[in-house]
Amino acid sequence: MRLPEGLVRRYAVGLVMDTVPCYRSGPDSEPGAKVLPGILVRHRAPPHRTGALVLQQAVALLTGQRVAVPTVTSAAGVLRHAQRLLPGFDAQLVWEQAPSDLLALCHEAVHRGGLVLLMWQSIAREVRGAPRPPSPPPQWMLVVGVEGPWRPVGDGSGNAVCTEASGLLVLDTQVHPGWGLGHNQCLVPGAYPFHEAAMRVAEFRSVWSARTLEGNLDCGFVLSAIALPHGKGQCAQ
């Protein structure tokens, strides 16, 4: 009998799905979860602060520590601070690449108990008859998980594994944190068909569509990524 198809999600180690995304600073058996830094602000984080906030979140998830991070925007600057704050992790900087390569990179990092930081460039929507709007400033987002095709374990238990990624589960400090999930935005390859500007950009570079938990859609591309894999990490489902 053919098993039902669907999606399975794999989240970063220590990420707790509560009323807002939280993290545990100790083993799962220890009670209490701490809210991730920078996601409960009533106003959106300014783009020039997203690099610092995302790195704070990464350190909290990976080490259980809250640290101060100076304002940093460039990929080289974020990498330098990541290496300083997370010496036990093999920080790897990659520039814009094919969606399949980025999906594989994020899947491997999460599978190994790590995270990925993305530098995202949104594509401004155009209104017919209006001047072409300027491009929004780039911002940093944190990949806290991946989703992929549902695959049974094979032992008859009905459990599923995420053997490959078809989308990225992201925490964005400029988007409402959501309820009951460890992410607030999902990125998938390809441009949203009704985003005319993104469709044109997709003719010469890799465009992604981003959907928030509230259904808001955006399109853009990933300028760079910093992978933070670590050991043989286990993953929270």
Image (tube, grey):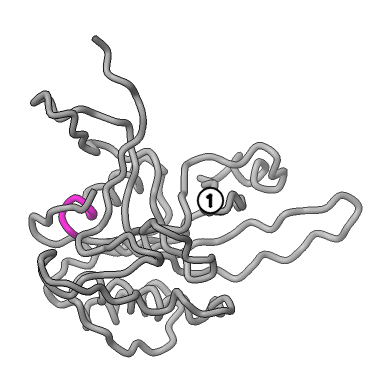
Asked whether, in this view, residue 89 is left or right of residue 20, the answer is: left
Q: In the shown orientation, is residue 158 left or right of residue 134?
A: left
Position of 150 relative to 33 (above/below): above
**Residue that protrudes farthest toward the right in the picture:** 129
Give the image location of residue 8, x and y in percent: 31, 38
Q: Position of residue 210 (x, y in %)?
A: 53, 50
Q: Residue at x 9, y 59 (%)?
A: 231
Question: Please, is residue 197 above or below residue 23 in the view?
Answer: above
The crowd level at tag 1 (other Cα within 10 Å; few <14, some 14-19, many 20+) is: many
Q: Which residues are magenta?
A: 109-113
Find the residue positioned furthest to the top. 1
109 or 147: nearer the viewer: 147
Q: Quadrant of the N terminus?
A: top left
Q: Main secondary structure of the magenta part?
A: helix
Q: Secondary structure at mark 1?
A: strand
Q: Nearer the viewer, residue 202 or 116?
A: 116
Tell me the residue that label 1 is attached to: 210
Residue type at tag 1: Ala
User: How many discs mark residues in the rendered view?
Assistant: 1
Q: Say if 54 sits above or below 222 in the image.
A: below
Q: Residue 142: horizontal and vertical position, in percent?
A: 38, 64
* In the depicted structure, whether residue 219 falls above or below residue 200: below
Viewer-side residue, 88 vs 154: 154
- Percent across and percent down for residue 139 are 51, 69
Q: Is residue 112 magenta?
A: yes
Tell me what residue is drawn at x 53 percent, y 78 percent: 45
Is residue 55 highlighted in magenta? no
The residue shown at (56%, 79%) is 42
